[in-house]
Image (cartoon, grey):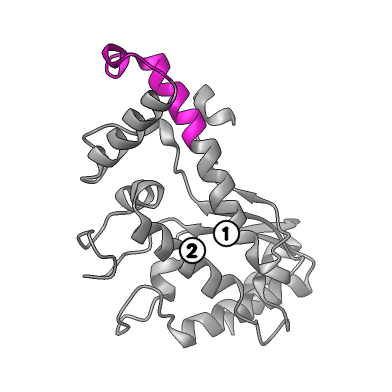
Amino acid sequence: EEAPVLAEAIARAGYNSVRFHHFENDMVDKNGKTSLDFDEEKLDRFFFLINELKKRGIYMTIDLYCSRSIKKDEIKGLWAPLGHWNYRNAVYVHQGAYENFIAYCLRLVTRKNPYTGLAMANDPAFCFVSLLNENWVDVWNDNNAGGLGWKWKEHYVNWCKKNGVPKKKYTGDIPMRKKFLVEFQHDFWGRISKDMRKQSWKIPLTMQNNGFSPVLSY
């Protein structure tokens, strides 16, 4: 009952786009085994709202990860509850977390909306999609990496060895570390965007959607 009223109010106010942000936990089945299980009633409401917005010519953008809570034992090798900052770190360097993220995204964007007749991945009403909200690599340090600081170090040391960086420069050389992060982000983006495009998804994708560090420019 509220969705058409909301959509109409947005349209009459002159807006032509909306953003779905921090919605994931409300969409998860509280009794499900993992955070990949949807609450079907909530999902139906979500799809209905999408259709009401679309009928009024309103475009949509969505953040596929902001704060979804990972359930206990959902990702092998990671503890729960896993805070959203640590989850984003884990997606970068932990294969189980990466696979969990891709699985969630594809379950949501390939699900057919019964009201529009289209899956989100094929709906032109979605103009932009953010994969991991505010996941800038420039914040990596050993204290905020969610116990995965050693993983970042491992990637960094391997990168240094590959590029012939002297061992004495491994630590304390901030420009060198920045260069590593730029290349790491570039390679990661190629990997994750390729995996998301497997469903013939044509919507423009983004991730580094905040901050002002030069490292983010790539």
Disc number at residue 195?
1
Mark 1 burial class by Cα count in 10 Å: few <14, some 14-19, many 20+: few
* Residue at (66, 78) in percent of width and height: 4
- Residue 20 found in image quarter: bottom right
Local secondary structure at mark 1: helix
Q: Residue at the spot x=28%, y=16% of the render?
A: 167
How many angstroms separate mark 2 from mark 1 (CA)?
A: 8 Å
Q: Position of residue 51 (x, y in %)?
A: 70, 77
Tell me the kind of residue under disc 2.
Answer: Ile
Look at the image and tell me whether residue 8 can be seen.
Answer: no
Query: Residue 182: within the magenta?
Result: yes
Residue at image mark 2: 102
Q: Is residue 138 above or below residue 88?
A: above
115 lies left or right of 177: right
Residue 39 lies left or right of residue 198; in this view the side is left
Closest to the observer, 201 or 127: 201
Q: Is residue 38 above or below residue 204?
A: below
Residue 86 pos. (x, y %): 30, 49
Q: Which of these two is toward me, 169 or 218?
A: 169
Residue 190, visible in the rendered structure: yes
- Residue situated in front as seen by the camera: 34 or 155: 155
91 within the magenta span: no
What amino acid is at disc 1?
Asp
| Dominant secondary structure of the residues highlighted in magenta in the image | helix
Do tag 2 and tag 1 residues touch (Cβ < 8 Å)?
yes
Q: Residues within 10 Å of mark 2 (few under 14, many from 20)?
A: some
| Label 2 secondary element | helix
Q: Position of residue 54 (x, y in %)?
A: 74, 71
Q: Which residues are magenta?
A: 164-184
